[in-house]
């Protein structure tokens, strides 16, 4: 039985290099038999956070929020594909994430980061780890960092060069760890209700 995984991506830039990495992750997870859905913050276009989903009276949330809340609740796990902006988190992805809270609870999240330089978005990945943990997700220890992204993935999201070879070698362990935590969380949720 496949796991339902949301791959979340948050760049709002015109020339979005990280979409290559998002496509790579989606294709490789689907190749492992997972049920993967792509969540593109730019395409959804949520306004800057004013009210969280839960702060809307029941049945009155904007359609985009209502739909996304259901997608998050129905997911078994998440992959956050994040670029690094000035040592920090992409605002588009952070804004999308902050619209929800309880919907994220008790499921694992994995972080895949990228940058144009050699540090591969490592500082953004570190910042996301604390943020996602605070929002009730279990952040898996395996991460992937890609940089320079233009020398690692083609426009179609296929590995190129030595960086691409390294990414191909790293992905199976990353995906195995995510799948292990998804199965553990599913079993635990089935066994007993969350404590709050």
Image (cartoon, helix red, strand yellow):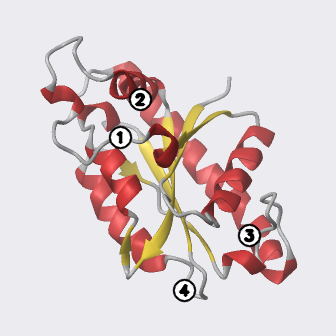
In three-dimensional space, the C-alpha distance between marks 4 and 2, rounded to whole angstroms, equals 32 Å
Tell me the crowding category of disc 2: few under 14, some 14 to 19, or many 20 or more residues within 10 angstroms, Cα based: some
Tell me the crowding category of disc 4: few under 14, some 14 to 19, or many 20 or more residues within 10 angstroms, Cα based: some
- The secondary structure type at the circle numbered 3 is helix
Quadrant in the picture for residue 66: top left
Give yes or no for contact between labels 2 and 3 (Cβ–Cβ under 8 Å). Answer: no
Q: Which mark is residue 68?
A: 2
Nearer the camera: disc 4 or disc 2: 2
Q: Which mark is residue 167?
A: 3
Q: Residue 86 at what x, y percent from top left?
A: 38, 82
In three-dimensional space, the C-alpha distance between marks 3 and 1, rounded to whole angstroms, equals 32 Å
Q: Which of the marked residues, 4 or 2, is nearer the chain's N terminus?
A: 2
Say which residue label 4 marks.
119
Q: Which mark is residue 46?
A: 1
In three-dimensional space, the C-alpha distance between marks 4 and 3, rounded to whole angstroms, equals 14 Å
- The secondary structure type at the circle numbered 2 is helix
- The secondary structure type at the circle numbered 1 is loop
Horizontally, is 178 left or right of 65 in the view?
right
Q: Is residue 97 above or below residue 57?
A: below
Give yes or no for contact between labels 2 and 1 (Cβ–Cβ under 8 Å). Answer: yes
At 37% from the left edge and 81% from the top edge, which residue is drawn?
A: 87
Q: Residue 62 at what x, y percent from top left?
A: 30, 23
């Amino acid at each position: 039985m496949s796991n339902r995984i949301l791959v979340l991506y948050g760049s709002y830039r015109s020339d979005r290099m990280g979409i290559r990495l998002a496509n790579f992750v989606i294709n490789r997870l689907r190749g492992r038999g997972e049920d993967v859905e792509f969540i593109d913050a730019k395409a959804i276009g949520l306004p800057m956070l004013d009210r969280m989903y839960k702060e809307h009276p029941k049945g009155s949330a904007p359609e985009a929020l209502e739909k996304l809340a259901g997608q998050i609740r129905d997911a078994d796990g998440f992959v956050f594909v994040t670029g690094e902006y000035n040592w920090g988190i992409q605002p588009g992805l952070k804004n999308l994430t902050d619209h929800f809270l309880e919907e994220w609870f008790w499921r694992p999240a994995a972080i895949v980061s990228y940058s144009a330089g050699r540090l591969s978005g490592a500082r953004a990945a570190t910042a996301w780890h604390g943020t996602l943990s605070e929002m009730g997700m279990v952040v898996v220890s395996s991460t992937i960092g890609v940089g320079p992204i233009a020398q690692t993935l083609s426009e179609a999201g296929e590995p190129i060069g030595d960086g691409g070879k390294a990414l191909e070698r790293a992905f199976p362990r990353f995906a195995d760890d995510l799948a292990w935590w998804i199965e553990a969380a599913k079993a635990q949720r089935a066994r007993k209700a969350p404590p709050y």
